[in-house]
Image: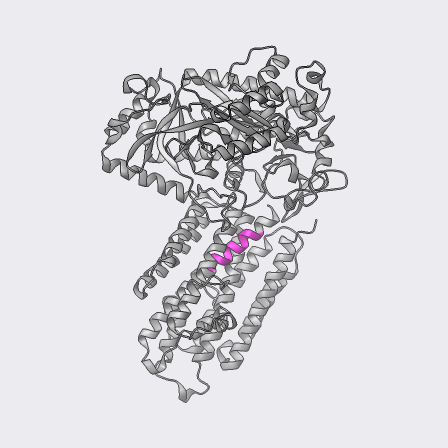
């Protein structure tokens, strides 16, 4: 097999270290893959494609008007991280999410961080994600971002950086769970005595976190998942999580808020009360009374019910204020301010165009930087300097000058690679990692997370809407295997 | 359970049954045409009427021949009850309610859909068509079996079954209406040598032949076939069997309902009181029409009672 000839390029490779030898945690899987002949490998790839297709791992892409399903590409070489290293990352993520929740709670209440001069008031005034309707509210346990998906990348020197935090409605966890299912089906031998940490308890951890938010204690709080519906790109995940938690999957039209601000769902036996809503609908669409009037996806009166404390919403409306890319630049200060600790996980060095000196630097160095708008996700509105044309750079220079607050810039990271199957053989492809952090009575971090892979040679864009795929992520306890 | 999902499951049940019945109809018609001499061909045109699409087909301006009709029934995207659109709807409805059904059933539905789309997009020759439709019938049966054996027999399950039985009862009356009208001679003298072959095809389209022979124990005659398919309480593809099942299922549902249950028991009475075996030609067609109208009323009251979106 041409695995033998695998050569990482000039990047940090997750599986293969110095001199082409596998790293300690990947030794077992590498040896196993090398031992497979062409035929055996082909068989497993086919089995894996089939398993993914049958299970309906499909991803709807917005711009495909026909709405046809397309299987999300899955690569069967896992990404491996040693448990020891992971424990450090896990502690860093917990610290980060804790600080971010303090930050959101503070912004909507006393705004001490602004008064103390750590966070500039004008950034808040210009924030598109700050929801005036949330002022003066303090949700149960003071937690706003119950589910956080932070994107991690590794640079050429091997350091893990946080690239961004998703505090609104992060998605992808179902792929993490399904990928593991597929791997266990296709490579059962590899999972025996290998020290691979399980990921399967995520749905029950999520359920516990959600149940802990119920307004009044109950043995069986009524938890529902609110989805925009089957045409949403992440619908597969909404259905999957609801099913795994045994919660009802509801759409806006299934819910109703009565005059005393309580939430019910319409069932075949009439109206039934709802305690906790894991909502996967954006703030803007969640309640036509409070936000966008034209929203067909929301529930009129939901904000009233939430403010009255009759229902818990996860994530809380307004939590997105802390995940725009400009706030990101302040996270190290935020951690120091609220927790009085040094950040355990690093931010990618970031220039804030808000600051005139930094803006000037960015505009002079567009060719080597990645420029990101504060409020766009999905990788559509970015400038990747080294790959940009002159016209694109001019366009971004104009955009930045017109609205400096909306832009940050970062160096082009040499994202780490992982061996990945391509047409004929195995080649290094760039990857990132999205672990998920749950905050309720307890804080929980997934063992690993979703590894996304840019399938095009040299590409750094891992978003599934732009042709990215995914891999199973193994946290391996090397002291066992 | 959510009213919306109850409705999805109900339609899922209906669409899967519709797909299966359509496959049965096409295969049996093909078989029958092989057995009949050319002058007596039963033809494909009745299938268009059975599925209630005479007007839609006429608009297409295609000649009424096997190729066009089968194409229309299997592939036509503008035909709301073509096999393609039916399977698509069955899958979409189950997709919306997939957290209620066992995962295996979703996987079966998904692979049935993908497999069928492949087949339907390909070059479906006569021989392959027959194998494909037979497989499809078995796949539908397998899904029904998996549901029966692995899903809690709760209200979610009940709604699938209600959809299935209502659709099946409706389909039986359509088969009898169209085939019966064409087949039943007005007088005994016209009884052709092929009459029993044609009635056998009706039985076979419902996989009823073997059970009919066992329980009726006489040669295949129009009046006995009618009686068996309308009134037999034990054969799962008779109208009466479906009505008895519906009565049980609807009776077990929560909420205030009297209209749908009353509709079902009224239909049972109607079947018991009507000498269906004596019905001929236009009378038969008229009676089947009446059954279809009452079935549609039951459908409407089920929707109003359990799927209504009024708070």
Give the quadrant of the C terminus of chain A: top left
Q: Picture quarter containing residue A413?
A: top left
Vertical relation: B9 (above or below) B229: above
- Name above or below for residue A264 compared with residue B177: above
Q: Which residue is drawn at 47% across and 44% down?
A: B102
**A455, B29: nearer the viewer:** A455
Residue A152 place in picture, x, y as percent:
48, 24
Q: In this view, does B130 lie above or below B191?
A: above
Specify the segment rendered in magenta. B7-17
Q: Which of A108 and A259 is in front in this view?
A: A108
**Label tally:** 0
**B50 lies left or right of B309:** left
**Magenta segment main secondary structure:** helix
In percent of width and height, residue B302 lies at: 61, 58
User: What is the x, y in percent for residue B69?
Assistant: 42, 70
Along the line of sight, which residue is nearer the eye, A153 or A76?
A: A153
**A243 horizontally vs A142: left or right:** left
């Amino acid at each position: 097999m041409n695995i033998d000839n695998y050569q990482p390029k000039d990047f940090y490779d997750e599986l293969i270290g110095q001199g082409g030898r596998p790293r300690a945690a990947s030794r077992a899987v590498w040896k196993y893959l090398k031992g497979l002949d062409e035929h055996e490998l082909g068989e497993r790839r086919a089995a894996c494609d089939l398993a993914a297709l049958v299970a309906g791992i499909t991803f709807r892409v917005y711009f495909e008007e026909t709405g046809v399903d397309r299987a999300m590409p899955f690569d069967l070489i896992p990404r491996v991280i040693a448990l020891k290293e992971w424990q450090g990352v896990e502690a860093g993520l917990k610290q980060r999410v804790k600080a971010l929740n303090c930050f959101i709670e503070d912004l909507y209440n006393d705004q001490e961080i602004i008064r103390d001069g750590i966070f500039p008031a004008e950034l808040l005034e210009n924030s598109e994600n700050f929801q005036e309707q949330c002022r003066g509210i303090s949700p149960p346990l003071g937690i706003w971002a119950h589910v956080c998906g932070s994107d991690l990348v590794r640079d050429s020197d091997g350091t893990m950086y946080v690239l961004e935090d998703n505090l609104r409605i992060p998605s992808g966890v179902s792929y993490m769970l399904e990928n593991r299912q597929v791997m266990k089906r296709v490579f059962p031998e590899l999972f025996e005595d290998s020290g691979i940490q399980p990921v399967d308890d995520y749905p029950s951890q999520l359920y516990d976190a959600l149940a802990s938010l119920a307004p009044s204690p109950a043995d069986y709080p009524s938890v529902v998942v609110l989805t925009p519906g089957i045409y949403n790109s992440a619908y597969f995940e909404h259905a999957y999580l609801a099913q795994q938690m045994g919660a009802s999957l509801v759409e806006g039209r299934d819910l109703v808020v009565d005059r005393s601000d309580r939430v019910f769902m319409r069932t075949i036996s009439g109206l039934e009360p709802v305690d906790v809503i894991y909502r996967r609908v954006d703030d803007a669409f969640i309640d036509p009374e409070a936000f966008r009037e034209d929203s067909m996806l929301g529930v009129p009166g939901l904000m009233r019910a939430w403010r009255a404390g009759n229902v818990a919403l996860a994530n809380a409306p307004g939590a997105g204020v802390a995940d725009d890319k400009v706030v990101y630049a302040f996270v190290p200060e935020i951690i120091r301010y609220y927790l009085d600790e040094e950040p355990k996980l690093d931010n990618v060095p970031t220039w804030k165009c808000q600051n005139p000196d930094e803006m000037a630097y960015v505009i002079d160095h567009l060719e080597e930087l990645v420029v990101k708008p504060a409020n766009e996700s999905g990788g559509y509105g970015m400038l990747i300097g080294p790959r940009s044309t002159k016209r694109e750079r001019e366009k971004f220079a104009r955009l930045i000058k017109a609205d400096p607050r909306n832009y940050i810039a970062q160096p082009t990271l040499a994202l780490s690679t992982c061996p990945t199957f391509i047409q004929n053989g195995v080649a290094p492809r760039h990857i990132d990692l999205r672990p998920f952090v749950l905050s309720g009575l307890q804080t929980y971090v997934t063992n690993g997370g979703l590894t996304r892979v840019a399938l095009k040679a040299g590409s750094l864009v891992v978003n599934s809407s732009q042709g990215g795929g995914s891999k199973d992520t193994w946290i391996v306890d090397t002291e066992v295997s | 359970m959510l009213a919306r999902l109850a409705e999805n499951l109900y339609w899922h049940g209906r669409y899967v049954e519709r797909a299966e019945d359509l496959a049965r109809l096409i295969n049996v018609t093909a078989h029958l045409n092989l057995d009949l001499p050319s002058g007596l061909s039963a033809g494909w045109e009745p299938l268009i009427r059975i599925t209630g699409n005479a007007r839609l087909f006429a608009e297409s301006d295609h000649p009424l021949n096997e190729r066009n009709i089968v194409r229309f029934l299997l592939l036509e995207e503008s035909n709301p009850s073509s096999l393609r659109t039916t399977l698509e709807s069955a899958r979409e409805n189950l997709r919306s309610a997939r957290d209620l059904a066992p995962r295996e059933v979703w996987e079966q539905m998904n692979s049935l859909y993908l497999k069928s789309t492949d087949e339907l997009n390909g070059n479906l020759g006569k021989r392959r068509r027959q194998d494909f439709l037979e497989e499809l019938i078995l796949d539908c049966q397998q899904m029904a079996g998996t549901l029966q054996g692995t899903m809690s027999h709760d209200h979610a399950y009940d709604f699938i079954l209600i959809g299935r039985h209502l659709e099946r009862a409706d389909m039986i009356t359509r088969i009898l209406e169209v085939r019966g009208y064409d087949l039943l001679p007005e007088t005994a003298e016209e009884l052709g040598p092929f009459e029993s072959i044609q009635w056998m095809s009706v039985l076979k389209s419902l996989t009823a032949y073997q059970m009919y022979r066992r329980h009726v124990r006489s040669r295949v005659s129009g009046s006995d076939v009618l009686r068996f398919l309308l009134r037999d309480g034990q054969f799962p593809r008779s109208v009466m069997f479906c009505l008895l099942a519906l009565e049980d299922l609807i009776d077990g549902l929560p909420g205030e309902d009297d209209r749908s249950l009353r509709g079902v028991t009224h239909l049972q009475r109607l079947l018991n009181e009507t000498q269906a075996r004596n019905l001929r030609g236009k009378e038969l067609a008229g009676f089947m029409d009446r059954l279809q109208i009452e079935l549609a009323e039951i459908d409407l009251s089920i929707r109003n009672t359990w799927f209504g979106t009024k708070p």
